[in-house]
Image (cartoon, rainbow, N blue to C red):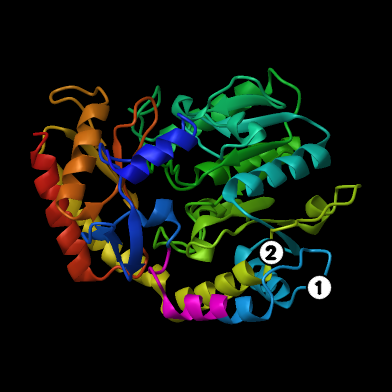
Amino acid sequence: MSSLHHRHLAVSPEWLALYYRHPLEITHGEGRHVWDADGNRYLDFFGGILTTMTAHALPEVTKAVSEQAGRMIHSSTLYLNRPMVELAERVATLSGIPDARVFFTTSGTEANDTALLLATTYRRSNQILAMRNSYHGRSFSAVSITGNNAWSPTSLSPLQTLYVHGGVRTRGPYAHLGDGEFIAACVADLEDLLGHTRAPAALIAEPIQGVGGFTSPPDGLYAAFREVLNRHGILWISDEVQTGWGRSGEHFWGWQAHGRNGPPDILTFAKGIGNGMSIGGVVARADVMNCLDANSISTFGGSPVTMAAGLANLSYLLEHDLQGNARRVGGLLIERLRAIGAGSECVREVRGRGLMIGIELVKPGTDEANPEAAAAVLEAAREGGLLIGKGGGHSTSVLRIAPPLSLAIPEAEEGAAILAEALRTVG
């Protein structure tokens, strides 16, 4: 055990998870690579949990942070803040929500917390619809709407949460159905559920479930849900903390795969927009955002430094068409990984879009989740010079692959080759 690991254990909660048998201290990064304290270099296919969205040490972002820090680091939302207003204007326009208002937070958890506050206040209801296998953060309210047992440490809740089918396409009671039939069955389930309860405030859903293992429904499910929700006056919250900013390649926001009936009422975002700086936020229609009748501020949300980083990062993303790069390079990577997976009895499915890819592992010859294999591949990939993540629903048996969106084709090929070798260690 390293000295730093020993010190970490002495002062940190037991439930604060660390990857690897011998945890890694990352000291610096550049582009799509990071280095540890021993000087080992790794290709980064997880980006600090989908947060280093463009690249490590991106000059445009580091320059913006440095220049703003030299002028003013902090002021709070009690004062006018030019970088915050400028980023809010851009996010409001990009969101697709009409007459949008933007509130910045420091994390995705806090963004979802705010969305729940808005929805329950607007609708005068504490009932929330959430998806099975979902994850929305670690706060008391966010845990209470998380449909993933591994990340839900308490059943106590300020909300009454009702869980809906549809977030996982290839498991569950409707997995055998075709896409159209799958959507129809999930809509019928939602209709039936609403017949047994008072009208909920909102449905919150990740278009692609992140911690749940990069699972997603067929395109159009949430559009079909929206028809039901609209009849009941129920709001739709799209949790874009992991799917936003073009990571899926096909769309800038995950909700756009389900946009037939318009944008969500509330959209939450975080992670990638700051490229490592602590930014989260909520976008909502003005009538929803303005429904609170008490004062509120944010001490750290919208800080000048993080807003400067967000502006520089968003500009770089758009000017260099990183969404298009995610589509092109991600498409190549997922093809390679599916070919590799076809040769392994442990791989049940390779799924995803753009640079948001999951490899689900099972015990050979069964459909049973294999978390031991996932842990072993995680270790083997590290030994080969590649950092990936893991997740999944009932058991943590999905390898999560989400590199920075500037990933180059040779790096995608290199990562796939390392993963192929790592998968051979488990069969």
Write the residue at 58% across / 49% down: 108
Amino acid on which disc 2 is placed = Gly
Whether 291 is drawn above or below 85: the answer is above
Whether 312 is drawn above or below 418: the answer is below
Magenta stretch bounds: 53-66
Q: Give x and y (percent) for residue 105.
A: 67, 55
Q: Is residue 264 visible?
A: no
Q: Which residue is mark 2?
A: 302
User: Viewer-proximal residue, 21 or 406?
Assistant: 21
Q: CB of mark 1 within 8 Å of CB of mark 2? A: no
User: Viewer-proximal residue, 343 or 194?
Assistant: 343
- Judged from the image, the secondary structure of the residue bearing numbered disc 1 is loop
Q: Is residue 61 magenta?
A: yes
Write the residue at 41% across / 35% down: 9
| Number of other residues with Cα within 10 Å of mark 2, as a class: few under 14, some 14 to 19, many 20 or more | many
Quarter of the picture containing the C terminus is top left
Q: Is residue 249 left or right of residue 75?
A: left
Q: Is residue 233 left or right of residue 304?
A: right
User: Viewer-proximal residue, 346 or 26?
Assistant: 26
Q: Is residue 30 visible?
A: yes
Write the residue at 42% across / 43% down: 218
- Indicate the quadrant where residue 21 lies: top left
Q: Give x and y (percent) for residue 387.
A: 27, 52
Sequence order check: which comes first, mark 1 or mark 2?
A: 1
Amino acid on which disc 1 is placed = Leu
Q: Which residue is mark 1?
A: 80
